[in-house]
Image: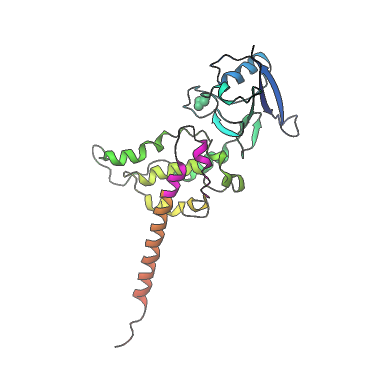
């Protein structure tokens, strides 16, 4: 028998003044995932242990949690891979988000920032009669970023979010990157103007926590960097344009 200790952060706002850690012992199989362990604890030891999960196949993004200090999906992570020498693992809710109960957090700010970047396609007035012709290169550029499952692991690993909830965040900026580079979108310029604002791409401190946390190996930092360059060009273009307009208004000196 290989006794394993699963340390779970508990918090019930109806009775607890602050979160605390509770230990549960179990004897897992070799292929038990962290989610399996949580479900075993819930069904055999304490039915009040609360956590989110749905697909169990790393698709829905609902089971992201903080395990031993790292944000991961618990449904596709073997328990054995996160145990220390004492066969112990510590599971906490995603950081920087209000706790609803135990391992369940309130993701409202995450979704609000997502909506802010208008993640849907804004089509031009004149759409093609049959279909858009998008080149393979253009598709390639967008392909990988499209696989984001909105689990929140990057968002709640971002220290800028920890300091400033107004920051749009890596998840939403990755989606904005998709739309700005999408050749079918009619409003990349307006999008860049918004993204260059106080809470946008220039707020990122390039700490790379979002890359470490992403369970799909995506690179939000690179996407933010690309948006920054485009926004800078746009800003420069706009400054030059204004400068030129000002010069047109200046009186011409005689002779
Ligand atoms: S349960 Fe859906 S991603 Fe883990």
Residue 234 position (above or below residue 31)? below
Task: Please identify the residue farthest to the front as the structure is shown.
Answer: 85
Task: Please identify the residue farthest to the bottom as the structure is shown.
Answer: 255
Residue 122 % position (x, y) = 37, 44
Residue 135 % position (x, y) = 26, 40
Q: Is residue 183 left or right of residue 176?
A: left
Of residues 106 and 146, which is closer to you in this image?
146
**Residue 65 occupies quadrant:** top right
Task: Please identify the residue farthest to the left as the structure is shown.
Answer: 129
The residue under the point 64% across, 17% down is 41
Residue 35 position (above or below residue 152)? above
Quarter of the image with the N terminus in it: top right
Q: Is residue 115 left or right of residue 29?
A: left
The residue under the point 64% across, 37% down is 98
Q: Is residue 55 magenta?
A: no
Which segment did they paint magenta?
205-225
The residue under the point 36% across, 74% down is 247
The residue under the point 41% across, 33% down is 147
Residue 107 % position (x, y) = 57, 36
> What is the image's colouring?
rainbow
Residue 204 % position (x, y) = 51, 49
Quarter of the image with the C terminus in it: bottom left
């Amino acid at each position: 028998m290989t006794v394993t200790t699963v340390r779970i952060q508990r918090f019930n706002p109806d009775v607890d003044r602050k979160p605390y850690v509770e230990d549960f012992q179990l004897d897992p199989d070799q292929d038990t995932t962290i989610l399996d362990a949580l479900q075993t604890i819930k069904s055999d030891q304490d039915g009040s242990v609360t956590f989110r999960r749905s697909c169990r196949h790393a698709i829905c993004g609902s089971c992201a949690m903080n395990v031993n200090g790292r944000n991961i999906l618990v449904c596709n992570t073997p328990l054995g891979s996160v145990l220390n020498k004492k066969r112990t693992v510590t599971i906490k809710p995603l950081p920087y988000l209000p706790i609803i109960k135990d391992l369940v957090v309130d993701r409202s700010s995450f979704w609000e920032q997502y909506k802010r970047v208008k993640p849907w396609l804004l089509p031009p007035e004149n759409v093609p009669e049959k279909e858009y012709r998008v080149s393979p290169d253009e598709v390639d550029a967008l392909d990988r970023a499209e696989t984001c499952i909105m689990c929140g692991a990057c968002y709640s690993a971002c220290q800028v979010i920890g300091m400033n909830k107004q920051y749009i965040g890596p998840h939403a900026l990755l989606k904005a990157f998709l739309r700005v580079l999408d050749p079918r979108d009619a409003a990349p310029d307006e999008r860049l103007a918004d993204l260059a604002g106080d809470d946008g791409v220039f707020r990122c401190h390039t700490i790379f926590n979002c890359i470490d946390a992403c369970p799909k190996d995506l690179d939000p930092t690179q996407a933010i960097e690309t948006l920054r360059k485009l926004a800078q060009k746009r800003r420069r273009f706009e400054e030059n344009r204004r400068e030129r307009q000002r010069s047109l208004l200046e009186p011409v000196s005689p002779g």
